[in-house]
Amino acid sequence: MNTTNMLFIDILLVTSLLSLAWATLTATDARRSVILFIAFGLVLTLAWARLLAPDVALAEAAIGAGLSGALLLAAVQHRPHRAVSAERLNSGMLDNEKQNNSNRPDLKSSVAIRWSITLFCIVLAFILIWALLLALSSETSETLAQSVSANLANSGVSNPVTAVLLNFRAYDTLLELAVLLTAVLGIFALSEERTGYLPAGPVFNGLVSWLVPALILMAGYLLWVGAHAPGGAFQAGATLAAAGVVLRLAGKRIIGLPQGSALLMNMILLSGVGLFLLVGLTMLVLGRPFLGYPPAMAGYLILLIETAAMISIAATLILAFLGGRPQNRQDESC
Amino acid sequence: MLTAHWLYGISACLIMIFGLRAALLHDSLLLRIIALNIMGTGVFMMLITIAYRGPDAAPDPIPHALVLTGIVVAVSATALALTLLRRLTEEQDND
Amino acid sequence: MINIIASLLMLGGLIFFLCGSIGLLRLPDLYSRLHALTKADNLGLGLLLTGLALYQQDLLFALKLVLIWLAVLAASSASAYLIAQHARRQETGQ
């Protein structure tokens, strides 16, 4: 890998990322902004792959570009066509249309406020760049990365990122699953699901008939391969959620969530955090530290926890796309 | 310090500042949510750049795990924010 | 020798991608843009992947690339159809 070739690719990637980010944030239309954001996510996947972060690249492609894009597109499709003109963003002048939103303060439109915030951002940019380059050029202490590679053999998996996520820092992953659960509870509390989509025509049905089984198979593979290669529960859960989203878009009634049984739905949502806690407390009962797996059983325990995490992540993301509590409509045809 | 560190480090800070400025100044709530996502992406890029050790050495896996957690948390926060936005616009339309 | 053929194929693929992008920018209508983009991009992808497979000279790698190409082909043609159908419905509905 020639260094000058890599430099060429790096400059291309960085330029694309910066211009896509700028274009996303100064777009005149909300729809355009969302599509540019999806493109930004895809180029970001390339950047992660170039920086030797394949796990993160898989997750970014599935979650950052795919599911975030789907969520934003679903959110933007019901808005009226209210284009935000670029001049309003830059000049900060009061507009007659803004009088409608009388409960919004006029603070943001003041020219002085805009310029002072922009100045603050520029100063912050210089400070950040200086701090980051200082940190990157100083001697790396290497202690944590060396501890990871030294203890990798006892962790039960051979992929260091999976070992860090599900063994060395398993507590953080437990809390992350709790954050997902909190988000879905918030979504449940706020509204009911969005209206569904029209039943799909023959072309989309043809796509769905091979795409959804392939996605399910790929999710199972990603779950299994996460132990020794890039992959894992999050990428697998996102792939399953993508299958559910495709089914929803095709107007199907059955999208992988339990129909009509709220208890089963709650069990599925709780299974990630629940199984994690169960394993952790069992370790406590056996006299080991919380979530301290015995090295002989670590691989199997990690696979068990990852399976439950995959199912609950998939259910959470599908429910997030649905936009609220699912309605149990018994009268509609499949 | 590698060239990649320079390039990606500076662009990560710039992406984060773009997102921060748009999140503070934009009118539309949806575009602010997108700007927050882009700010988060800048932070992730900072972490991955710190973890990069060159084309031959294995990268540091701990910032990778942090970014993986961060991506999932960001999408769930975005989903909650979008549901809040939808509820807010429904309430405003009903007034 | 194989590398030269592979490079020529990849270059051909890139030219098709470029033509697709020019079509996206210059063509007047949604349908013609979709037409240009889908056809040119898929053919360009096929040429690019063939060049990559020749460059790597590994059978398993080549089979994976063929699978990727088939999946992209099916997904992009289905989505182009859906976009065009939606645009048509919006036109005739109004």
Image (tube, grey):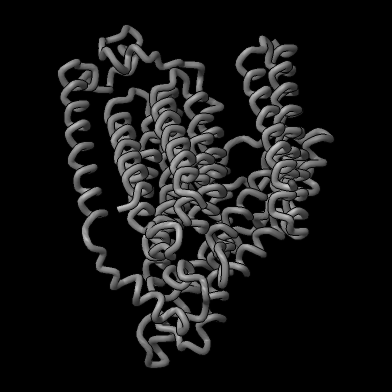
Where is B18 relative to C64, above or below? above
* Residue B20 sits in quarter: top left
- Is residue A190 visible in the rendered structure shown here? no
Nearer-the-camera pick, C85 or A64: A64
Q: Is residue C88 visible?
A: yes
Tell me the quarter of the picture where residue A108 sits. top left
Point out the residue furthest to the top here: A96
Outermost residue on the front side: it is C1
Q: Looking at the image, is A268 positioned above or below residue A59? A: below
Residue at 31%, 36% in the rendered image: B14
At horizontal 34% and vertical 51% (from top left) the residue drawn is B2
Q: Is residue A80 left or right of A326 when viewed as pictured? A: left
Q: Nearer the viewer, residue A88 or B50?
A: B50
Residue drawn at (73%, 16%) of the image = C32
| Image location (x, y in percent) of residue C41 | 70, 31
Task: Report the number of discs.
Answer: 0
Which x, y percent locates residue A211?
74, 48
Q: Image height check: is A183 above or below A252?
A: below
Q: Position of residue A315 (x, y in %)?
A: 58, 56
Q: Nearer the viewer, residue A180 or A116?
A: A116
| C38, above or below A90, in the image | below
Classify the position of the C terminus of chain A by image quarter: top right
